[in-house]
Structures are given as C-alpha cells and as structure tokens.
Image (cartoon, helix red, strand yellow):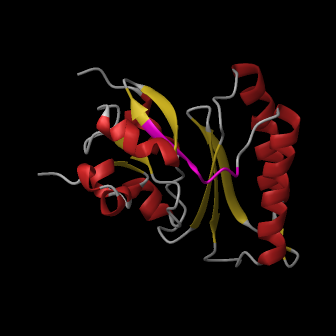
Amino acid sequence: MEQTIFDTWRELVPADFADNSRVWIYQCNRMLMMSEALQVEPMLEDFVANWKSHGAPVKGYANLFFGQFLVIMADESATTVGGCSTDSSVRMVKEIEQRFRVNMFDRLSLAFLVKGKVEMLPVHQLQYGIEKGFISPDTIYFNNLVQTKADWLNKWMVPAAQSWLASRYKPLTTV
C-alpha cells in the first residue's frame, strides 16, 4: 500500500516536547493555496520565536498540516502558558484569517479524510452524510478537540466510530 502524507504527518511533530504539552488545533474552512501556505510559514516561525508568557520564552511549535489545520503546541514543562500568551496565539490566528479571508474558528464544520482528501461537512449535514454513505464508522475524522501532544498523536485522526460522533450518531457505531 502506498504511503501518503496522511500516514507520515507524525514525523513533523517535535520529539523533544513532553507528551502533556498543550495543543490547539484550528481548522481552516478551505485548503490554503501553496502561495498562502508559504506566507503562513514565516508568520508561524515568527510567532513561536517571540512567544512569551509573563516575560519568559515559551517552548512552542506551530505548523500547518495538510494545508488546512493550524496546530500550535506549548511545552509547559519550563514555562506555563497563561491567558495573555494564549490570547497572543489567538491574535496570530485571527491575523491569518483576515489576511487570507478564511475562517479558522468554525466549530460547526467537521473534517473527514475521504478518498485521500480532507473533506468538510457542516455538522447539521452529518446525518445526511451517514445515510448516503459519505461517512461510515471507518471514515477518518479529524478530532480537533485534542488538548495534549499525546492525544494529538493518538486521537487526532481516528475512525468516526472511535470519536465523540459515535455517541451522537448511532449509525457510526461499529456492529
């Protein structure tokens, strides 16, 4: 079986961050074009290089995955990330939104991996997607609610039947 980027993304996650490092995932309402992604990269690098909490540098990481998911991570083993430093990350995400005319705060849109592509589905259309066979218990769901590095590595891309969706949409439970 051919290996895809969806199989190798974990290689981009820094090994030197603690498993309990805090993670925030922002899902873009569309895939960024290559030219946009190339502009986002230095914005993320600059943010991480200057990220501080109460004047102390934050051991941070930020990257764009699959052109659509902005992941920010902070290893709090040395410096705890407070409200102001979290707010600064949100401001950076809002800057990306404004510059590229995208939405990264829509929590009512779900992302799935379908036929090798990230596909978005509004939550109110999920039942329809299940009934039409677009979404099955085995369809990979991007669980952007993960909060730690360990959960990001192990519970971000999961079959829909292993996510919170299965408790709300009975057809997603495996038989």
Query: Looking at the image, can residue 168 be seen?
Result: yes
Residue 130 position in % (x across, y down): 33, 40
Q: Nearer the viewer, residue 167 or 66?
A: 167
Quadrant in which the N terminus appears: top left
Q: In the rendered structure, does residue 107 fall within the stretch colored magenta?
A: yes
At 74% from the left and 67% from the top, the residue drawn is 58
Q: Is residue 109 above or below residue 151?
A: above
Quarter assignment of residue 90: bottom right
* Residue 57 seen in the current view: no
Q: Residue at x 29, y 32 (%)?
A: 133
Work out whether 139 lies above or below 56. above
Q: Where residue 88 sits: x, y (%)?
A: 84, 63
Residue at horizontal 61%, vertical 54%? 107
Q: Which residues are magenta?
A: 105-112
Residue 140 placement (x, y as % from top left): 35, 41
Query: Is the residue 143 above or below the residue 55 in the image?
Result: above
